[in-house]
Image (cartoon, rainbow, N blue to C red):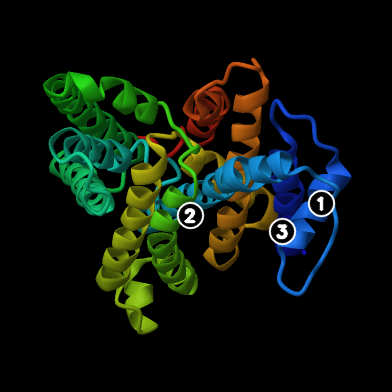
Amino acid sequence: MWLAGALALLAVVMIAGLLGGAADIAPWQVVLQVADWLPLVSADAGLTPVEQGLLYELRLPRVLLAAVVGGLLAMAGAGYQGVFRNPLADPYLLGAAAGAGLTTTVAVVLLPGSALTTPVAAFAGAVGGVFLAYGLGSAAGRTGGTATLVLAGVAVTSFLTAIQTFVQQLGVEELRRVYSWILGDVGGGWEQVRLVLPYAVVAAAVLLAHGRMLDVLAVGDEEAGALGVRATRVRFVVLLAASLATAAAVAVSGLIGFVGIVVPHAVRRLAGGSYRSVLPLSLIGGAAFLVLADLLARTVIAPAELPIGVVTMFVGAPFFVAVLRMTRGTAT
């Protein structure tokens, strides 16, 4: 029931995303045009060639990219929370996004024009940022503590962001591009959609396949071992998959925060805590959430446009405070 409801919500939000913009196109025309794009379906929406080009070349890839990025970030957040058994674990707070941002900035400034290096650099940075934050938290003697892990992630994020700022100054001509990327942008077009899809499919498939194992890990490592689950291996694989998801999202959209906290927590409140439900619903819910955030970013101050990262921060910051209050009993 929840899966069907989430898919219906995503469909409605994506149609709304195709409607949003300066050009006034009737909803029924958008629906007919989307149907016409489907294989074995022919429908006349009555759109001019300019309007068709607007939908296909500008709005459709933007909506699809927002959906892919939102789904990846939400799944990554759910995966990190399962691995660390920490409700505040999130790509943005654990240093994954900052690490990916740093290495992507290095690729943009020092290796311009090389699209293939960006996802690879982002993946290396995301993995490095998470391991650095987790290692710092472990060195403090509180590996599983909520507050310790979050503080370690904040420290690593601040440090990596400082280095990123320094690197930006080495390529002044790239500053505008880098700053717009830092604030989040899903308007990259079909090229970015094609770039992120292979990484998205691999990361999503691995995370979805480990839902049951994350449920087993939630009862404890000894119990998981008795059931034949190798806890260390599962954590390592899920950590890599979540970092790949984060890196792929950051590489094509920039730094978009709080999706990995807002969506998984909302899913748990509605559908329960089993990762067999949390992971697929986070994928769909994250897609719907970011498409809606992008729609707001395009329409709130139209004809101007807000960076999508600003919209998610407006929603995510108070949500994070609420989650922190709910977990204050375990944050020692």
Give me the residue at 88% from left, 46% from top.
Answer: 28
With 39 as the anchor, is 116 left or right in this view? left
Tell us which disc is closer to us: 2 or 1.
1
Whole-number angstrom distance, CA of label 2 to CA of label 1: 29 Å
Tell us which disc is closer to us: 3 or 2.
3
Give me the residue at 54% from left, 44% from top.
Answer: 66
Mark 1 packing: few (<14 Cα in 10 Å), some, or many (20+)? Answer: some
Near-viewer residue (307 or 86): 307
Q: Is residue 89 visible?
A: no
Q: Secondary structure at mark 2?
A: helix
Mark nearer the N terminus (3 vs 2): 3
Q: Which mark is residue 31?
A: 1
Q: The C terminus appears in which quarter of the rendering?
A: top left
Give percent across and percent down for residue 169: 15, 19
Amino acid type, label 1: Val
Whole-number angstrom distance, CA of label 1 to CA of label 3: 16 Å
Q: Is residue 181 above or below residue 86?
A: above
Per the image, the residue denoted by label 3 is: 7
Near-viewer residue (120 or 93): 120
With 60 as the anchor, is 245 left or right in this view? left
Q: Secondary structure at mark 1?
A: helix
Give percent across and percent down for residue 251: 34, 45
Give percent across and percent down for residue 240: 29, 61
Per the image, the residue denoted by label 2 is: 75
Q: Is residue 130 above or below residue 161?
A: below
Mark 2 packing: few (<14 Cα in 10 Å), some, or many (20+)? Answer: many
Near-viewer residue (87 or 6): 6
